[in-house]
Image: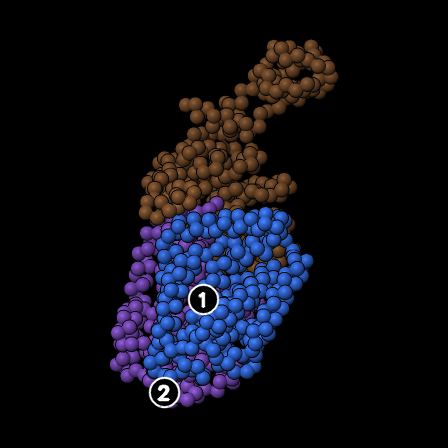
């Protein structure tokens, strides 16, 4: 099967002015300015097949949004090849544009002073969605996201969560086959995040859409994506199943212990590497395979009030991935 | 007391420094603005010059005298814009919630809003145009005495008082409706009416522009005194109206603050 | 083209969301025209002629310019530069819709709105100043309307060109400010272009400015022969073509370097 999305040695470099700080620097800038070349995307290649939900993970400025924008046809690649649904995004053919959607967490496409429904009708006209299909899709979306009673209120009067839901509907009412979601849950509360995640999952299942998702919230990635691509300073440093990262980098499990009596550090160090120690609490890192056994030993040997065995958080794992990259 | 003044001076100095730095960074824009203002000034003078060649006078004034009215407007407008630049960014400050910071700090928020970001383009424009104006006036046929000159500058203080009051009113409207930009431009257009002597306008506009929206008191009256012409009203009454207008604006400010609803979350 | 009709409709609605804002804007325009009419009325008391104009002609000029400015100079493209710089246009770029047609539809909605207001304002000013405006014969009137439409297209093109600055800098207001300053004395409400000495006029006619409102007024008042009218309209079209050409060039370049800034 042909991949739906394909990047080959994609590069995007930017030129940025530098300004020296202070008043003297400003005066200097009158006759001399320095440039810096930023390698936002520096040789990235990957293929994505239909129906996949892929997570883009990376720090701020790593190149995630830049890559998405090239996939959408907004940015002109410095070099390399891009293909989405068989089209070159930069050509911006209407047939291509009708089949994908880009949702950027902080960029609004809804008209601020008018009710969301007006923007929906506008998109319907732009994407040439037939009446029947429009009504079917929009009803389904409005119910899924529970926004029926707010679509006729001015957008500026809505809360961030409500706005985000309406932005999603505006982006999806033409049933795109490919979805680029850039930080879709940013700034939303925990409940809203879950609502959006469930929605994305449902959309993928129902329409077989191919989705690329960037997010800072590991919860998003963990719940939605089987596959993750990690980008650091414009390079791809990992591309594979999320579980692989966890297995590969998370050698240890975390034992959180609460004691009923004081225990010395020395005693604890027999069982594993001590990460935190504080009066009646301690955190121990134990290799995965031995975790259960060690926990049992501790329970019988030491005065334990409570014990918890946990996976390290994805954030911690990813941090380790970056740190090990730095050491390379 | 002196300490308080020093604090205000430091705050003003700091915002001025930033304004200057910004200006230097966007050097081409600054230059373009300078040229634009210069063009505007030059063309209006050219118009008056052409009028002078073609006609003797306007509405009972000689064209030489009309030039003085225009230059007075130019002077006060320039100075006002130099120092009261803060109002032009006010709509952003209200919408973004920056205003909250001003209101919660131990510094008079009006001071911050009015004088924030002094305009150095206007400042650098001020010097050449003032020198030019003085030279130009010296070449015209006018009757200026030292008494009239002193009265003129005395009345200009009233002008700035009224200008401050206008700006405060604009700020009040901004707090209540977030509609600042059009209102401040309306103020600018209204004062631009005083490029020409206000008493050439018909009633009831003349009365309105002198006593209710006292644009006439700002520019026309001082020029009338300077040129030893028949003034529309007395110095005393002018200051009374100016002072009253200013107090009204402060009262309105206090009222508006009570109605203030902070920007949303 | 249903989608552009939709854009028009939504822009129209959007234009009335802040009626106070619109009213203030119209009040300002009204004030400017009023000032100009007053000044000229005063100037002409005691004089039959000034600058080769009679009072009738001058008043007619100011009325016309006020009218033309509202429909030619009113534009929504003032935000194009900053929309490009902040990346806001991304939203439109990735949809199957033509950005320029969108801007044109929005502009037409805006001009139509202003048109409605200027009719009302003109009636009020008519009642106050009671000018005697002689309407030209039908053919001249049609040519006038045609030249006015071309003037609007010219302004639209110039604004597009200014918009492309947004690809490289956030400071898009300065050049527009300069532009409006020049409009003020070449197609301005206070005085017509031909009060200037001939040399200055010649220089100004090398620029596109006189073609934005000035020549239209002269066509209306009947100051041009057929030959001159044709000549001026031809130059007007030439300007439109030139500017659109420049615009196209900068637009293509800008798009390639487009950083689509902001998140």
In the figure, is residue B111 to the left or right of B66? Answer: right
Chain B color in figure? blue
Residue drawn at (37%, 75%) of the image: B140
Q: Which color has been applied to chain A in this rendered view?
A: brown
What is the crowding at mark 1: few (fewer than 14 residues within 10 Å), some, or many (at least 20)?
some
- The residue sitting at the front extreme is B146
The total of numbered circles placed on residues is 2
Measuring 42% from the left and 34% from the top, which residue is drawn there? A233
Relative image position of residue B98 (x, y in whole percent): 57, 51
> Badge 2, how many Cα within 10 Å: few under 14, some, many 20+?
some
Q: Which chain is purple?
A: C
Q: Residue at x 36, y 40 (%)?
A: A36
> Residue C150: x and y, percent?
36, 72
Q: Which residue is mark 2?
A: C49
Does residue B222 appear anywhere in the picture? yes
Disc 2 and disc 1 on one polypeptide chain:
no
CB-based contact (under 8 Å), mark 2 and mark 1: no
Query: x and y percent of residue C78 in the render?
Result: 44, 61
């Amino acid at each position: 099967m042909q991949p739906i999305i394909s990047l080959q040695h994609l590069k995007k470099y930017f030129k940025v002015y530098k300004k020296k700080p202070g008043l003297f620097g400003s005066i200097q800038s009158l006759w001399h300015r320095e440039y810096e070349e930023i390698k936002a995307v520096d040789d990235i290649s990957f293929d994505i097949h239909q129906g996949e939900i892929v997570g883009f993970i990376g720090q701020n400025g790593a190149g995630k949004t830049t890559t998405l924008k090239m996939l959408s046809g907004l940015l002109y690649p410095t070099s390399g090849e891009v293909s989405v649904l068989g089209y070159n995004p930069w050509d911006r053919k209407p047939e291509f544009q009708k089949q994908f959607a880009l949702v950027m967490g902080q960029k609004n496409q809804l008209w601020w002073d008018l009710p969301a429904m007006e923007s929906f009708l506008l998109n319907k006209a732009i994407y040439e969605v037939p009446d029947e299909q429009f009504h079917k899709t929009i009803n389904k979306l409005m119910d899924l996201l529970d926004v029926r009673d707010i679509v006729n209120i001015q957008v500026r009067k809505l809360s961030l969560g409500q706005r985000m839901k309406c932005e999603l509907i505006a982006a999806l009412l033409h049933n795109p086959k490919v979805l680029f979601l850039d930080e879709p849950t940013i700034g939303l509360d925990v409940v809203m995040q879950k609502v959006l995640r469930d929605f994305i999952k449902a959309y993928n299942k129902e329409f077989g859409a191919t989705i690329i998702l960037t997010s800072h919230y590991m919860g998003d990635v963990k719940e939605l994506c089987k596959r993750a691509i990690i980008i650091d300073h414009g390079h791809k440093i990992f591309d594979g199943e999320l579980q692989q990262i966890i297995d590969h980098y998370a050698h240890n499990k975390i034992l959180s212990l609460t004691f009923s009596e004081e225990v010395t550090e020395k005693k604890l160090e027999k069982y594993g590497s001590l990460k935190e120690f504080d009066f009646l609490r301690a955190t121990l890192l134990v290799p995965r395979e031995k975790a259960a056994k060690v926990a049992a030993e501790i329970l019988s040997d030491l005065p334990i009030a409570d014990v918890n065995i946990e996976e390290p958080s994805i954030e911690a794992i990813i941090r380790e991935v970056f740190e090990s990259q730095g050491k390379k | 007391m002196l300490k308080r003044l020093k604090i205000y001076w430091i705050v003003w100095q700091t915002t001025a420094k930033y304004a200057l730095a910004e200006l230097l960074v966007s050097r081409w824009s600054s230059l373009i603005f300078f040229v634009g203002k210069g063009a505007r000034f030059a063309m209006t003078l050219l118009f008056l010059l052409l009028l002078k060649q073609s006609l003797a006078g306007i509405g009972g004034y000689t064209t030489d005298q009309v030039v003085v009215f225009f230059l007075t407007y130019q002077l006060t407008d320039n100075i006002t814009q130099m120092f009261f630049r803060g109002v032009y960014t006010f709509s952003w400050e209200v919408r973004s919630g920056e205003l909250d910071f001003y209101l919660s700090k131990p510094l008079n928020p009006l001071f911050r809003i009015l004088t924030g970001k002094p305009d150095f383009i206007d400042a650098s424009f001020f010097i050449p145009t003032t020198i030019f104006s003085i030279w130009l006036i010296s070449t015209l046929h006018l009757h200026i005495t030292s008494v009239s000159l002193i009265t003129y500058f005395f009345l200009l203080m009233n002008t700035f008082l009224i200008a401050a009051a206008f700006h405060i009113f604009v700020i009040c409207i901004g707090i209540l409706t977030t509609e600042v930009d059009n209102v401040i431009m309306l103020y600018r257009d209204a004062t631009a009416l005083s490029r020409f002597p206000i008493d050439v306008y018909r009633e009831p506009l003349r009365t309105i522009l002198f006593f209710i929206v006292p644009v006439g008191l700002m520019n026309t009256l001082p020029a009338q005194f300077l040129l030893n012409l028949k003034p529309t009203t007395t110095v005393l009454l002018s200051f009374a109206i100016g002072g009253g207008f200013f107090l009204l604006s402060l009262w309105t400010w206090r009222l508006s603050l009570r109605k203030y609803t902070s920007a949303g979350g | 083209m249903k989608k552009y009709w939709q854009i028009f409709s939504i822009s129209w609605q959007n234009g009335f969301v802040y009626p106070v804002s619109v009213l203030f804007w119209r009040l300002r325009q009204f004030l400017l025209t009023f000032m100009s009419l007053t000044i000229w009325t005063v100037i002409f008391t005691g004089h039959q002629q000034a600058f080769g104009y009679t009072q009738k002609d001058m008043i007619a000029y100011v009325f016309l310019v006020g009218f033309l400015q509202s429909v030619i100079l009113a534009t929504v493209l003032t935000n194009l530069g900053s929309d490009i710089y902040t990346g806001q246009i991304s939203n439109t770029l990735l949809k199957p819709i033509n950005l320029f047609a969108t801007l044109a539809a929005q502009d037409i909605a805006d001009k139509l709105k202003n048109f409605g207001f200027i009719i009302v304002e003109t009636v009020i000013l008519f009642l106050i100043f009671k000018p005697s405006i002689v309407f030209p014969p039908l053919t001249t009137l049609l040519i006038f309307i045609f030249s006015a439409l071309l003037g609007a297209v010219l302004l639209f093109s110039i604004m597009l060109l200014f918009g492309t600055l947004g690809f490289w800098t956030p400071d898009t207001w300065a050049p527009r400010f300069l532009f409006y300053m020049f409009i003020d004395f070449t197609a301005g409400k206070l005085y017509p272009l031909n009060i200037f000495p001939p040399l200055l006029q010649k220089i100004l006619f090398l620029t596109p400015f006189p073609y934005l409102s000035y020549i239209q007024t002269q066509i209306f008042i009947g100051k041009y022969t057929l030959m001159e009218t044709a000549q001026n309209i031809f130059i007007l079209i030439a300007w439109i073509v030139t500017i659109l050409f420049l615009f196209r060039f900068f637009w293509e370049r800008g798009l390639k370097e487009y950083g689509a800034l902001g998140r």
